[in-house]
Image: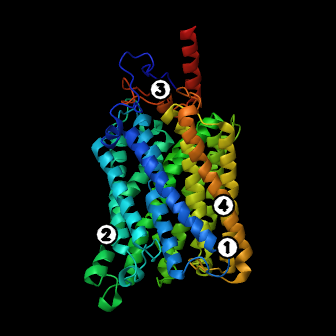
């Protein structure tokens, strides 16, 4: 039985109510801030900048593939364009997108804390991210990298017409940003929860970021080691990966994918947390099987470290190990399926409304499910031999990471935008943007599944003429998708000045972040809240609203 929460009234407290968005002290106060909310905004601006650079490179790729002949770029230039697109989008957008922005902004408020455990380290993580991003842009301007975003050896260790060390240094530095962010989240969630905020009263967004933080802290150093070894072999010629010097070329693949497959879950787990919050709010129901959904996040994090070799089935690994990793790949789908089924059960007989965040959430479920199911094909040994290194891989990856992750990111931005800024955005155009994004995405990447099945290899700038129709359709879809991504930036910026005042809880949600003013106070809470009700308790919210109406009357 739920009881009444003891939450001090943040609106009537007599302490000065200064929003984190106050304009005092100017730009310097932002650049030296320890406020997790301001750091989240700095991350949001930076990540958006890199997203549009990566998107512009994607546009060049699709323009090249309009025609079968490689007539827009040379093969070397094309290699550099798709490599830099991958590096920027994976390491500078997808990995930090939800944790560094929404996670930074919301986790302290959701657990009832006034800030993250280590504010200065939090600010340092943003500076490291900016330095890493700057070095990546430097590598692009100096001539780019042509190894693919995976830095595959011997391409990354033996060929001299590529700025591997600059790009690897960028990722190495940005990796420390991820480690510091993950460490901050873990300590905050363990040590700074408000009284009464037990583990099973935590919002599922917190659970998912906690699981992703474990992956950040444990997985990122392995990638850092791999990149350092590449740089050492490239500069002083030590034989780590070169078989002529006693090295093992497969060692790099093991090190890289040991991080990079868990990195998929670093990207997607926080997005899954967003979807749990949105679906619960707009169906007015507690998430079905809350405990199962929470533990499934941890299970995904654990299983994520045991499936890396499914990226290596055609690289000469033993048949026995390939069989074991194929089985583990199938098993990792189970906790993801738990989330999908439980979200569907949450919707069942719910009071569903179709606000913009909910539309993006539905888009996530559809696209992520397709991406996950096609991953089963790639986990099957026979199918993987045929489909690896084709456009089927490109489509699968983008359905999971771009279709899924970006839909979740946009769902979260639209859901918490009123809390972050105190302003609402235009509802009609935002719903149109969600619809345009969903249609554009499917037009872009569904044809690529067919292209891959028919055998079109990825990473080629020229292709047989019989593949042109599907490539033209994919490029047209990318144009529609670009419009869908550009619209939110325009109307969200417009809303900062002209949007309607949001109020503290425009969605009538139950989390602690919705019980304080919008935008939040610099210190989040005037007094420490005492959490004494279950997560997603809409009966408690109705009683709270009734009490407030009675008090005002």
427 or 222: nearer the viewer: 427
From the top left corner, tell me how far across and down residue 420 is, in percent: 48, 36
Question: Residue at left 35%, top 18%?
Answer: 15
Residue 436 in sight from this viewpoint: yes
Question: Residue at left 49%, top 67%?
Answer: 86
Spatial distance from mark 2 to mark 4, Cα to Cα?
39 Å
Relative horizontal placement of residue 132, taking residue 315 as reference (left or right): left
From the top left corner, tell me how far across and down residue 540 is, in percent: 55, 24
Q: Is mark 1 on a helix, strand or loop?
A: loop
Mark 2 nearby-residue class (10 Å; few <14, some 14–19, many ≥20) = some
* Mark 3 and mark 2 residues within 8 Å of each other at the beta carbon: no
The numbered mark, 4 or 1, whose residue comes first in the sequence reads 1
The numbered mark, 2 or 4, whose residue comes first in the sequence reads 2
The numbered mark, 4 or 3, whose residue comes first in the sequence reads 4
Q: Mark number for residue 66?
A: 1
From the top left corner, tell me how far across and down residue 265 is, in percent: 48, 58
Q: Mark number for residue 479?
A: 4
* Mark 2 and mark 1 residues within 8 Å of each other at the beta carbon: no
Q: Is mark 2 on a helix, strand or loop?
A: helix
The numbered mark, 2 or 1, whose residue comes first in the sequence reads 1
The residue indicated by pointer 2 is 225
Question: Residue at left 60%, top 52%?
Answer: 485
The numbered mark, 1 or 3, whose residue comes first in the sequence reads 1
Relative horizontal placement of residue 324, taking residue 457 as reference (left or right): left
Relative horizontal placement of residue 370, taking residue 210 as reference (left or right): right
* Mark 1 and mark 3 residues within 8 Å of each other at the beta carbon: no
Spatial distance from mark 1 to mark 3, Cα to Cα?
50 Å
């Amino acid at each position: 039985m739920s009881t009444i929460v003891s939450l001090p009234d943040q609106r009537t407290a007599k302490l000065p109510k200064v929003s984190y968005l106050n304009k005092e002290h100017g730009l310097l106060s932002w650049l030296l801030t320890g406020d997790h909310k301001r750091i989240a905004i700095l991350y949001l601006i930076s990540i958006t900048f890199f997203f549009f650079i990566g998107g512009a490179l994607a546009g060049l790729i699709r323009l090249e593939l309009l025609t079968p002949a490689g007539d827009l770029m040379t093969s070397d230039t094309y290699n550099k364009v798709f490599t830099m697109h991958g590096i920027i989008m994976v390491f500078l957008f997808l990995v930090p997108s939800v944790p560094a922005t929404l996670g930074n902004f919301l986790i302290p408020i959701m657990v009832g804390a006034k800030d993250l455990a280590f504010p200065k380290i939090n600010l340092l993580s943003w500076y490291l991210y900016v330095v890493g991003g700057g070095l990546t842009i430097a590598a692009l301007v100096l001539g780019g990298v042509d190894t693919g975003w995976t830095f595959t050896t011997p391409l990354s260790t033996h060929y001299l017409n590529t700025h591997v060390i600059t790009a690897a240094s960028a990722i190495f530095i940005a990796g420390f940003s991820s480690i510091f962010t993950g460490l901050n989240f873990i300590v905050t969630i363990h040590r700074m929860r408000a009284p009464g905020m037990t583990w099973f009263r935590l919002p599922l967004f917190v659970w998912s970021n906690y699981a992703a933080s474990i992956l950040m802290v444990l997985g990122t150093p392995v990638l850092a080691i791999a990149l350092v070894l590449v740089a050492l072999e490239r500069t002083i010629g030590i034989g780590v990966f070169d078989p002529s010097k006693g090295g093992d070329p497969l060692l790099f693949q093991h090190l890289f994918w040991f991080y990079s497959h868990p990195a998929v879950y670093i990207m997607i787990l926080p997005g899954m947390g967003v979807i749990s919050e949105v679906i619960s709010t707009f169906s007015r129901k507690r998430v079905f099987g809350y405990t199962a959904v929470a533990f499934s996040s941890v299970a995904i994090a654990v299983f994520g470290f045991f499936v890396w070799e499914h990226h290596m089935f055609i690289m000469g690994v033993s048949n026995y190990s390939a069989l074991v990793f194929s089985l583990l790949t199938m098993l990792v789908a189970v906790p993801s399926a738990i989330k999908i089924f439980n979200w569907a059960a949450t919707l069942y007989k719910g009071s569903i409304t179709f606000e913009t965040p909910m539309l993006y959430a539905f888009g996530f479920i559809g696209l992520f499910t397709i991406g996950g199911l096609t991953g089963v094909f790639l986990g099957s040994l026979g199918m993987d031999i045929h489909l690896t290194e084709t456009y089927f891989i490109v489509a699968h990856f983008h359905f999971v990471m771009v279709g899924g992750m970006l839909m979740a990111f946009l769902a979260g931005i639209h859901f918490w935008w009123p809390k972050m800024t105190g302003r609402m955005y235009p509802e009609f155009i935002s719903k149109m943007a969600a619809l345009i994004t969903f249609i554009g995405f499917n037009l872009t990447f569904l044809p690529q599944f067919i292209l891959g099945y028919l055998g079109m290899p990825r990473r080629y700038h020229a292709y047989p003429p019989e593949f042109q129709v599907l490539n033209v359709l994919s490029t047209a879809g990318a144009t529609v998708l670009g419009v869908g991504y550009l619209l939110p930036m325009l109307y969200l910026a417009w809303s900062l000045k002209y949007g309607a005042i949001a109020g503290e809880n425009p969605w009538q949600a139950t989390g602690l972040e919705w019980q304080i003013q919008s935008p939040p106070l610099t210190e989040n809470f005037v007094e420490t809240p005492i959490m004494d009700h279950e997560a997603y308790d809409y009966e408690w919210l109705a009683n709270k609203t009734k009490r407030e109406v009675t008090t005002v009357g």
